Image (cartoon, rainbow, N blue to C red):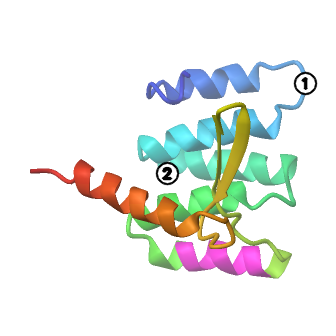
């Protein structure tokens, strides 16, 4: 919550004051705040901690790569992607769940295997059209 609100230093202090090693999700939340509020310096510091905490998880690498891309630091984007390739890490696709009539449905980005994928993408296109600015 602190990092989302832009209170990045407070979020960092909270994580640093934990009596145990922070869980990867706490570091990922701080990294997400760094990305949202364009704090590259803290992002780089945080991502190193995240890499140690979750060495086989591509999430931190992808977030840092996206942060660099939004800042136009394309050389750094390539370096992060190179590191991912060397470690055999790949970006995981997005996934969502929804419950409808007591049945849970899951959707994965780019997945055409769902029995109603055509209908789903038609509705998504309509929703995107509705959200376009006038």
| Magenta-drawn segment | 77-85
Q: Residue at x 46, y 76 (%)?
A: 74
> Does 57 appear in magenta?
no
Q: Residue at x 44, y 43 (%)?
A: 36
Tag 2's secondary structure?
Answer: helix
> Does 79 appear in magenta?
yes
User: Residue 86's x, y, as percent?
Assistant: 81, 81
Position above or below: 40 against 61: above
Q: Which label's residue is closer to the chain start, 1 or 2?
A: 1
Q: Are marks 1 and 2 in contact (CB under 8 Å)?
A: no
Q: Residues within 10 Å of mark 1 (few under 14, many from 20)?
A: few
Q: Residue at x 82, y 31 (%)?
A: 22
Position above or below: 35 against 123: above
Q: Which residue is mark 1?
A: 20
Q: Number of labelled discs?
A: 2
The reply, left or right, for residue 94 in relation to residue 103 is left
User: Residue 11's x, y, as percent?
Assistant: 60, 24
- Which secondary structure class fits the magenta region best? helix
**Res 44 label:** none
Q: Nearer the viewer, residue 22 or 123?
A: 123
Q: Residue at x 62, y 73 (%)?
A: 112
Tag 1's secondary structure?
Answer: loop
User: Residue 103's x, y, as percent?
Assistant: 73, 38
Q: Residues within 10 Å of mark 2 (few under 14, many from 20)?
A: some
Residue lying farthest to the left in this orientation: 134
Q: Which residue is mark 2?
A: 40
Q: Nearer the viewer, residue 75 or 103?
A: 103
């Amino acid at each position: 919550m602190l990092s989302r609100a832009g209170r990045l230093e407070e979020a960092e202090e909270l994580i640093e004051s934990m009596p145990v090693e922070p869980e990867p999700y706490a570091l990922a939340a701080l990294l997400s705040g760094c990305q949202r509020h364009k704090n590259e310096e803290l992002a780089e510091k945080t991502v190193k901690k995240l890499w140690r905490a979750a060495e086989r998880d591509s999430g931190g690498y992808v977030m840092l790569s996206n942060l660099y891309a939004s800042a136009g630091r394309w050389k750094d984007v390539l370096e992060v992607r190179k590191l991912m390739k060397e470690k055999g890490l790949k970006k995981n696709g997005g996934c969502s769940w929804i419950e409808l009539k007591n049945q849970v449905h899951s959707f994965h980005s780019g997945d055409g295997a769902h029995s109603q994928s055509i209908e789903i993408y038609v509705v998504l296109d309509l929703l995107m059209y509705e959200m376009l600015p006038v």
